[in-house]
Image (spheres, grey):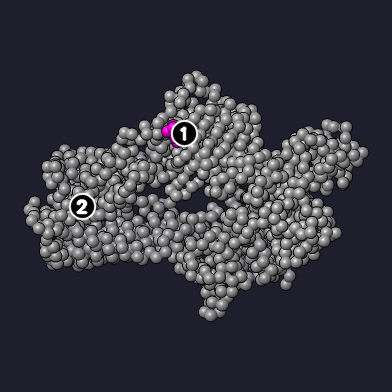
Amino acid sequence: MTNKDFLKLEGKKSGISMDKIMTIFCYVALIAVVILPVFMIIYYTFWDGSKIDFEMFRSVLFQKENLRAMKNTLIIAVFATLFATLVGVFFAWLLGRSDIPMKGFMKFLFSIPFMIPPFLAAMSWDMMFSGRGGYVNKLLMSLFNLANAPLNINSIPGIIIIEVVYYFPFVYMQVVSALERMDPTLEESARIAGANQMYVIRKITLPLTVPAISSGVLLVLITSLSNYGIPSMVGYSKGIFTLPTMIVELMNRSGGSFVGIRQAAALSIVLVIVVAIALVIQRRLLTHGRYDIIKGKSMRPMLIKLRGAKIPLLVFSLFFLTLIVIAPIVMILLVSFNRAYGLPFTMENFTVMHYVNVFTKNAMVKDSVKNSLFLAFSAGAICLVLGTMLAYVIYKVKPKGGTILEMLAVLPYSLPGTVMSIGCILAWSGAFFGISLYNTIWIILVAYIARYLSYVLKSSSAALQQVHPSLEEAARSCGASHYEALKDVTLPLIKPAMLSGFFLVFLPCMRELTTSILLYGPKSRTLGVAIYQLRINGQINQAAALSVITILLIIIMNNLVKYITRDRRKL
Amino acid sequence: MNKIELNNITVRYGTNTVLEHFNLTVEPGQILGIVGPSGCGKTTVVRAICGFIDPQEGTVSINGNIMYDRAKRINVSPEKRNVGVVFQDYAVWPHLTVYDNTAYPLKKHGVPKDQIRPQVEEALRLVNMSSYHNYMPSQLSGGQQQRVAIARALTSSKDLLIMDEPITNLDAKLREQMLVEIRLMQEQLGTTIIYITHDQEAAMQLCDKIVIMQNDGSIAQIGTDEEIISNPANRFVFSFVGVSNFLPVIKQDGKVYLDYDEKILLFDEVPAEYPAADRADIGIRPMDIVFDETSPVKAKIVSAVFFGNIYSYFIDIAGNEYRVQRITSGNEEDEKYVEGLEIGVRFLNCKYFDREVKN
Amino acid sequence: MTDQIVLEHVTKTFTTKELGSVTAVNDFNLTVKKGECFSFLGPSGCGKTTTLRMIAGFEDLSEGSIYLGGKLVSDRSKNIYIPPEKRGLGMVFQAFAVWPHLNVFENIAFPLKVKKFPKDEIRRRVLEAMHYCNLDGLEKTFPSDLSGGQQQRIALARAIVVNPEAMLLDEPLSNLDPHLRESMRFEIKRLQKEFGFTIIFVTHDQSEAMALSDRMLIMDMGNIQQIGTPWELYNNPKNRFVHSFLGQSNFINVDVRNGKVYPKGETSQQIWVDNKPSKNGEQVLACRPNMMELTKDDGFRCRIIKRTFKTDFVEYLIKVGEDSAIIQAPHRVLFKNGEECCVKIHNPAWYDLEDEAAEKERERRNVV
């Protein structure tokens, strides 16, 4: 033993390694943000203070009001999903496989709904089509001399329409990318086999996109089931409740009473069960796993010539997209510059007063901008660190129970936001260690972290799995220690993914309503809450002005992300 | 100066034993090829040398220094073993430039700043990448990335390189070229190189000595290309290196017969290397079965395929198919041996092996 | 009808934003006989796949006409274009193109179902095709559970099930590992013998093309370079491109004086060749490594520079004048590094210096 660098085998194993510390930390964090809230919901539902109690759950389940909410939720979800799928698949095929012109422009329009929070879209549709007061309704009535409003958005069909136009891009995105990835020879070989164009679409193209369609369907279904913004914006005034809005309603009615909170918790469990059933059904329907439809040679697929149908289809598509994408934005813009809601849009009614008022006269709004930025930044940053650490622990350290860690981190993603919030309230209002975060901004932060952690986990772990072990081993053989290899090689390589993970959290936090509506306190309103309250208070023009600001903020941030991630990809 | 010794190495993954009591000595200043079918444990051998795995038994020493000794509980960590490694998937760091990739080992080894640049330039010159200092790996082709990986391994250690299937991911033309370049580089520097591959042809072209490993992780033969071709140690080596035919033979009254239901006289004398048992197999290369009308052994041509420089045939002898190859002559003779033809065949360069019991 | 596929003056021009107008296929004339196996061989981007896709009907022509079984199927000037599904061809693609949502039986039955065959007829013919392609018993299996070789057999069975007159194969073996490639090649050959269909086979792998085809053509930059049997193309290449593209070759600069061949810059000994050049002066001798014979003491005297063992033969590197040459010999002909030997060159070809320079330039551009 002449070399002092020689290490004893035992020496290497003694002491607590960095990997171990991170593993423990991940467990602690997940217990705090996931396990405790979920546990508390179950605890409150089935524990009446002294004994196990199913009676309460049963009575909540069969209450007339709740049954109606359940029925509404299901009807809305089923029809919204059905129509969104039809529309999404149609446009995916039109853009992916036909020779319709202006594809670039249409693709741009499809990306817009992703940037606008659903409750803002709902608010705008409400401005256009709510009974006799909606601007478009008024216009149509005077144009065609109608006695009644042609479309009443404050109804279940109304909610379905908004959800369809808001959710069909989910399906579109999934299907169009499947079409683009599909090997064109799959379709060509069917042509050679003697099948004509339409037959190929029916028997080959469509069946092959079934997995993509079905994942789109699932996304729409779950989002619709747990959506709070749209039904509350257009349904609340007419007393139309869905499960999420009913839960919030119960929570508000309870006024903090034990029984009231228990009822809300019980209804949350009902909602979770409904979502779980939807998940199971979807798994069952997807019979043979995932298809391998990747490309062989890089060839562009033959585009189907629309010939005579080209112009009518183009006109229809553009009209449709204008109505559902551009009109809502224009409506909010117009209202935000209009002197008072209900007045016609003329030059003399033009004013910027609402923008000024929003910022000078309203402390709530100023707070909300500050709060939302703070929440989005800190949730993004914390998720970034915690999610990457989780990814590292799960995929590189591989401790026993690694899959449990992953399941825990992903669980809140499929739980409705409303449910997660109730869990947070129950867990962090003094139930453990006397910590009470209720009515503070911190409880919102905890809920955001729980909800969005899986976004960073997904993007970081995908990147981490791309880092082949030989890259680290190469560093080791070049003279770098385990820690140095991590710092010099692994971390820089996953940096772009971490960064985009940050924005994946930041953006939804900026426009969040579902969680914060339950958790906000007098000083911790978020942008979403502020808009919602302005609207409820009848300050519709100010709500519109704040909405415009929110949309602008989101667009700016979104472009920032694109700029940053593109820059990184060049490397 | 950089002798590597593996002594009595045993590696197990769970119940699966990859190497058992494995011994190997690598002489300095040469290219040693380790060849074997996939899963034979050749990569395990080099990972034990690099320190990426800890064998259950045995010692590893480089240049007389013990790097690993299970019994004495010595285990030098990979970064201190001074071995340059070239991986199959290049493992060039995509976030660093060609220059930074190559300079990294020098920085980690604490080389003074002013000496880094000349050493990096020298290494990149050796692999013909001088004009690519500021390129990112994604701007390079596979072959160029592998050159960078070699340059990086060189700055890490000029004395000992381990190359684990370094050219497998490249296309045929580039592979050929890289082999030539690796040889040239080795001749300039005198580096000891351990070259892992499943491709016997590349090993024969590049290596001074070749280790052929069998499926069970043991060494079948160590030798030069000529030794391995001309004197295969056993049946495995013979069939692993190239296409092989095995014909059953039997020795009777001082003569050798093909051992089919009907015995066909093959040789009038029993050669000295004939195994002890009466029944044996001869191993023969497709090139060494030649058509000869005068030969008493008759065969039927089942198929004839033209590949340009060679013709490849399947022939039938007493209901058994064998492969035959002939170098194309470019004249009428080529057209003579067509499918269905009955012809005599002669066997040259036969190797004798013990009869393999078929199950 | 003995001419199955006829192409007359077929030309295809693309217009792209970057390059402007590009001629992918230029004045292509070809007659493939019934039952023939014909290969298109060429470097990537030479236009072979485009030609095949024009025959299949996936690409329109810019000029010329295509006949299948005597019927005109594509003609730009007469405005005739029969869509792929009505051309009655079978086609097999590189990426197998087996439909993952259908099981093996449904995949193979697809062409028959489209043509509305009766059920029991479909069943009979599919099972028969499966039998021919060694797929027995896999009816209910889905392609994702099968190996690449089996998937390609499904594609083959799907193509032969309608008994097509002609079969287009677009690099069908390139996605298979080398071992499988050989057995699939035999399989295709066997099926062709069985059914007698015409094959057009597109490939960039020359040994595949030579092994499989009755006749073949070599294409480069949209132009046909030579058409003939593999043996003709290998042994009597028409030009310098064909010579270097098909198989390995040595190119040696020589100086011919009075019909005697000397290496360039050397006068001491002449090169032993069995066919003399037609003219004197500096030129290039091209010869195949396998047609250079190594002997102990008969022929052009030289020294072994390097010996490399290959699995099938030994390669010797020697120098002839200023150029190096590679010789292939069986393992039993063994010389050592540095040993003296003699070389005889059989069947050499002779090229002008200009050809050589043009070809060098071409190769250099290809490398860049």
Residue picked out by circle 1: B69
**Overall secondary structure of the magenta stretch?**
loop
Q: Can residue B32 be spotted in the picture?
A: yes
**Along the line of sight, the residue nearer the viewer: C223 or A221:** A221
- In magenta stretch: residue C250: no
- In magenta stretch: residue B71: yes
Residue picked out by circle 2: A38
Chain of the residue that carries numbered disc 2 in the rendered image:
A
What's the residue at 24%, 57% (across, down)?
A: A226
Range of the magenta residues? Answer: B69-74
Q: Alpha-carbon distance for marks 2 and 1? A: 51 Å
Above or below, B60 relative to A437 = above
User: Where is residue A269, by image quadrant?
Assistant: bottom left
**Amino acid type for the residue under numbered disc 1:** Asp
User: Where is residue A55, by image quadrant?
Assistant: bottom left
**Along the line of sight, the residue nearer the viewer: A74 or B27:** B27
What's the residue at 79%, 59% (across, down)?
A: B253
Contact between marks 2 and 1 (CB within 8 A): the answer is: no
Give the quarter of the figure containing the C terminus of chain C: top right
**Amino acid type for the residue under numbered disc 2:** Val
What's the residue at 62%, 30% (across, down)?
A: B29
